[in-house]
Amino acid sequence: MGDDTSKQTGGASPLTTQVLDELSLPLEELVRRGARQLIQRAIEVEVEALLGQYETVTLLDGRWCATATFPSARC
């Protein structure tokens, strides 16, 4: 039955493939990946919060103030 399930679903999904790939990794690498993901998400949340604080602040010429600090930020 286990061999037939991939045929029934049309092959393994990308998520299933990712999970199977991660199962073959050493524990240390899994921990590193998890830590990297947590740190990345924490930084994203912090930047969003920082930009949110200056959402309504503009420079004298009308530009959004954070664009001077973050050139890739929205205008």
Image (cartoon, rainbow, N blue to C red):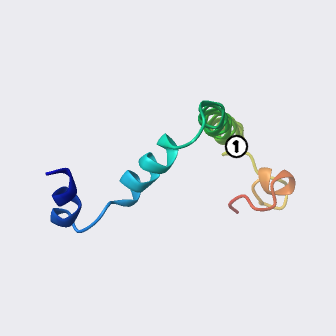
Residue positioned 36% across, 52% down in the render: 16
> 47 and 38: which one is in front?
38
For label 1, the residue is 51
Q: Quadrant of residue 55?
A: top right
* Picture coordinates of residue 50, whole percent (x, y): 71, 37
In the displayed structure, 25 sits above or below 68; it is above
Residue positioned 70% across, 43% down in the render: 51
Marker count (numbered): 1
Q: Secondary structure at mark 1?
A: helix
In the displayed structure, 5 sits above or below 28; it is below
In what quadrant of the picture does the C terminus appear?
bottom right
Residue positioned 46% across, 52% down in the render: 18
Residue positioned 81% across, 61% down in the render: 71
* Picture coordinates of residue 39, whole percent (x, y): 68, 34
- What is the crowding at mark 1: few (fewer than 14 residues within 10 Å), some, or many (at least 20)? some
Q: Quadrant of residue 64?
A: bottom right
* Picture coordinates of residue 2, whole percent (x, y): 20, 51
Horizontally, residue 28 falls left or right of residue 6, namely: right
Horizontally, residue 70 falls left or right of residue 37, namely: right
> 33 and 42: which one is in front?
33
* Picture coordinates of residue 68, whole percent (x, y): 86, 56
> Label 1 amino acid?
Leu
Horizontally, residue 18 falls left or right of residue 72, namely: left
